[in-house]
Image (tube, coloured by chain):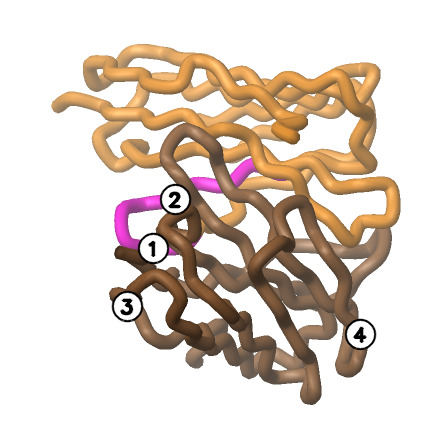
Chain colours: A orange, B brown
Amino acid sequence: TQLLEQSPQFLSIQEGENLTVYCNSSSVFSSLQWYRQEPGEGPVLLVTVVTGGEVKKLKRLTFQFGDARKDSSLHITAAQPGDTGLYLCAGASNTGNQFYFGTGTSLTVIP
Amino acid sequence: NAGVTQTPKFQVLKTGQSMTLQCAQDMNHEYMSWYRQDPGMGLRLIHYSVGAGITDQGEVPNGYNVSRSTTEDFPLRLLSAAPSQTSVYFCASSYSSGLDTGELFFGEGSRLTVL
């Protein structure tokens, strides 16, 4: 059962462009995390959002948790080649013991 | 500063063979888990453990066994490998379980091919 759907699945943009990645679900999560994964490595945490409507900024990255805690978005401003990677959202179950990962968005930023 | 260590990094099995993927962490994390990653499907939880002696099933537990005899180690066993188990496997740990579960720290992955 895939609880989290991400869109788009693939994204190829020029350096300097802006982009938004979406993570949607019909389920409510106690918290939601975003990870970035580079080839041959495990995912690395970017941010955790907990409160519905919460917005967090990490330099050029802006993360938002939906009011109903069912969806989230990641916005990157002025993308750079170093942003290239697989972006994964992950929702925590009510007990916090299970994390359900999204389908992933593969981002390529062309210099 | 090892973090989460997985072995082996690569393995090729024949259908029906058994093997164990090893996972060890040196951060004294209570929570450990195993995921498999397949193209277009993100990561799916296989099994997890909230502490030594305690394990539970995730989304896709069939064909896999786990045990947690120590805080540091969480091996994943494939009793009779099938081609459908061809995947990249990730072990991850976190400092606690429950609603305080925080960042998942991942190993580098183990790529398994079943012929």
Please tell me if label 4 and label 1 are on a single chain: no
Q: Which residue is mark 4?
A: B54
Earlier sequence position, callout 3 versus callout 4: 3
**How far apart in space, not on screen, are marks 4 and 1 (Cα)?**
28 Å
The lab-note entry on whether marks 3 and 2 share a chain reads no
Q: Disc 3 and disc 1: Cα gap in Å?
A: 17 Å
In terms of secondary structure, where does tag 3 sit?
strand
Chain at tag 1? A
Give the percent coordinates (x, y) of residue B98: 85, 56
**Span shown in magenta:** A33-42
Viewer-proximal residue, B80 or B55?
A: B80
**In the displayed structure, would residue A74 be above or below residue B111?**
above
* Label 3, label 2: how far apart the Cα atoms are: 22 Å
Amino acid type, label 4? Ile
Q: Where the C terminus of chain B falls, by quadrant?
A: bottom left
Labels 2 & 1 near each other (Cβ < 8 A): yes
| Residue that badge 1 annotates | A41
Element at label 4: strand
Residue A13: x percent and y percent?
Answer: 24, 14
Residue designated by label 2: A37
Q: Is residue B99 above or below residue A62?
A: below
User: How far apart, in angstroms, are the residues tagged by discs 2 and 1?
Assistant: 6 Å
Extreme residue in the front direction = B16
Residue A81, image x, y percentages: 22, 30
Q: Residues within 10 Å of mark 4 (few under 14, many from 20)?
A: few
